[in-house]
Image (cartoon, helix red, strand yellow):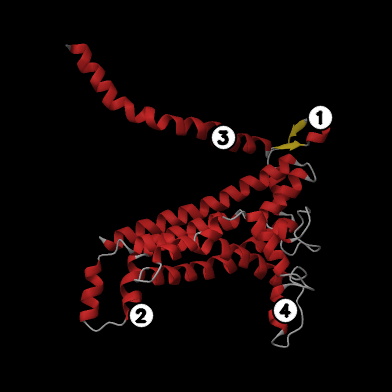
Amino acid sequence: MAMPHLSARLDTKGSPYLYVLPFFLLFGAFGLFPLIYTGYVSFNDWNLLDAGEHRWVGLANYSELFHDAYFWNALGNTLSIWVLSTVPQLLAALWIAHLLNHRLRARTGLRMGVLLPNITSIVAVTIVFTQMFGRDFGMVNWLIGLTGIGPIDWQASTWSSHLAISTIVMWRWTGYNALIYLASMQAIPHDLYEAAELDGASSFQQFRRITVPMLRPTIIFTTVISTIGGLQIMAEPLLFAGTSTPTGGSDRQFQTIALFMYEQGFREFRFGYASAIAWTLCLIIAVFAIVNFLLTRRIANDEK
């Protein structure tokens, strides 16, 4: 009688670990090991063109990185594109979610429609937008020309290229964040809105006083997720240049950290230096994750 009882206890306590074991095995093989190995490579002068030979240099790659003007230029470009894309994107997503939360005709179709840009191929989207922002025959310059303003070379300057790339990012991710906000809005008790309406609160006042405060954890979540994605942006600026050159324009005016890492690793073949860039980017993302944790914990404590 003891053996079946022991087997049942092992099954009860051990089954959950067996269920999650495949995830940890895959994460260890394709996530943790590459991360650790990249850290090891970053401490070496590693060039695959030299038959894979490498030499231990310690923190030399990191020291060079922090004195590299191209790195700081790429970091500034990355943060600029992130601000220009994330802030309008989340505000627009919040507004769209607020509209979709009302009783509209074809509401299900509209909700599905806002997700279509996210499931579209990023390559196809960027190529289309690159043509729209073309200097000579682009639709954007044609619309601007109707107001009497001359054509803009969107790739030539820093601000115009950042604005164009940010538009691509916003178009692709606004609907995705809107659906996240919509799901959170539908979890808000409707009694709060009814009570506010009885007290004479307008629709805008209900949105500002009820909806936004109740969505604070979700807003923080989408902000951090958008930040993590924005810091890793690569495909949009690479394809926006119209070539396979990862310099981000003739004067590196829209080269991001990911593009700079790609350039050093697969154009200059400096894998040690590229790995140092990757780990630095990882640490920057970790800082934002820690800030998210602290903000979330503070909000949770304030609501108690």
CA–CA distance between discs 3 and 2? 47 Å
Crowdedness near tag 3: few (<14), some (14–19) or many (≥20) residues, C-alpha within 10 Å:
few
Closer to the camera in the image, 298 or 25:
25
What residue is shown with label 1? 51
Indicate whether 132 appears above or below 300: below
Estimate the spatial distance between the alpha carbons at disc 3 and disc 4, rounded to whole Å. Answer: 47 Å
- Binning the other alpha carbons within 10 Å of mark 1 as few (below 14), some (14 to 19) or many (20 upward) gives few
Reading the chain from its start, which is encountered first: label 2 or label 4? 4
Q: Label 3: which residue? A: 30
Whether residue 129 is visible, yes or no, is: yes
Query: How far apart are labels 2 and 1 at the CA level?
Result: 65 Å
Structural distance between the alpha carbons of marks 1 and 4? 52 Å
User: Which residue is at 78% across, 41% downward?
Assistant: 269
Q: Nearer the viewer, mark 2 or mark 4?
A: 4
Residue at image mark 2: 204
Q: Position of residue 66 (x, y in %)?
A: 69, 53
From the image, state whether disc 3 or disc 1 is nearer to you. Answer: 3
Q: Earlier in the sequence, mark 2 or mark 1?
A: 1
* Element carrying mark 1: loop
The residue that disc 4 covers is 142
Q: Amino acid at mark 2?
A: Phe
